[in-house]
Amino acid sequence: MRVQADSAKTAANQERLYNASNVTEWLKAESHGEKRLAALFERRFLPEFRPSHNYDLLLYGSVYPTSLD
């Protein structure tokens, strides 16, 4: 039982690290205007991680446009 719990904990920590690394690299690519690289990292997001992210909110602080440009 303890071995299974440790295994599950390790897997969860690895997934968390994977997600954090992808988001970090995605943010760097976005901030440098590297759209193709950002798209690559965005595609690598795990499916269960994707719905919890609103990219406009993360990048711009709002899901609504601040201007009509």
Image (cartoon, helix red, strand yellow):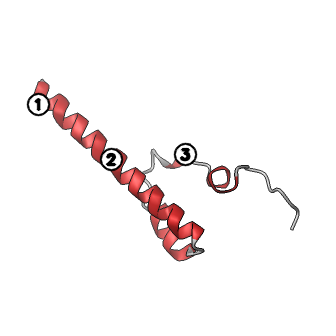
Q: Tell me the quarter of the picture where residue 34 sits.
A: bottom right
For the point 15% across and 31% down, the residue is 4
Q: Amino acid at mark 3?
A: Pro
Q: CA distance from mark 3 to mark 1?
A: 32 Å
Q: Are marks 2 and 1 in contact (CB under 8 Å)?
A: no
Q: Label 1 belongs to which residue?
A: 3
Q: Secondary structure at mark 3?
A: helix
**In the displayed structure, does residue 21 sit left or right of residue 69?**
left
Q: Where residue 54 appears, x then y in whole percent?
A: 62, 49
Q: Nearer the viewer, mark 3 or mark 1?
A: 1
For the point 28% across and 47% down, the residue is 14
For the point 45% across and 44% down, the residue is 48
Q: Amino acid at mark 1?
A: Val
The first of marks 3 and 1 along the sequence is: 1
For the point 86% across and 60% down, the residue is 67
Q: Label 3 belongs to which residue?
A: 51
Q: Secondary structure at mark 1?
A: helix
Q: In which quadrant of the rendered image does the N terminus lie?
A: top left
**In the displayed structure, does residue 15 sit left or right of residue 60?**
left
Above/below status of 1 relative to 18: above
Q: Nearer the viewer, mark 2 or mark 3?
A: 2
Q: Where residue 3 appears, x then y in whole percent?
A: 11, 30
Above/below status of 64 relative to 12: below
Q: Label 2 belongs to which residue?
A: 15
Q: Secondary structure at mark 2?
A: helix
Q: Which residue is at the front of the view, 4 or 57? A: 57
Q: Tell me the quarter of the picture where residue 25 sits.
A: bottom left
Q: Where residue 43 appears, x then y in whole percent?
A: 47, 63
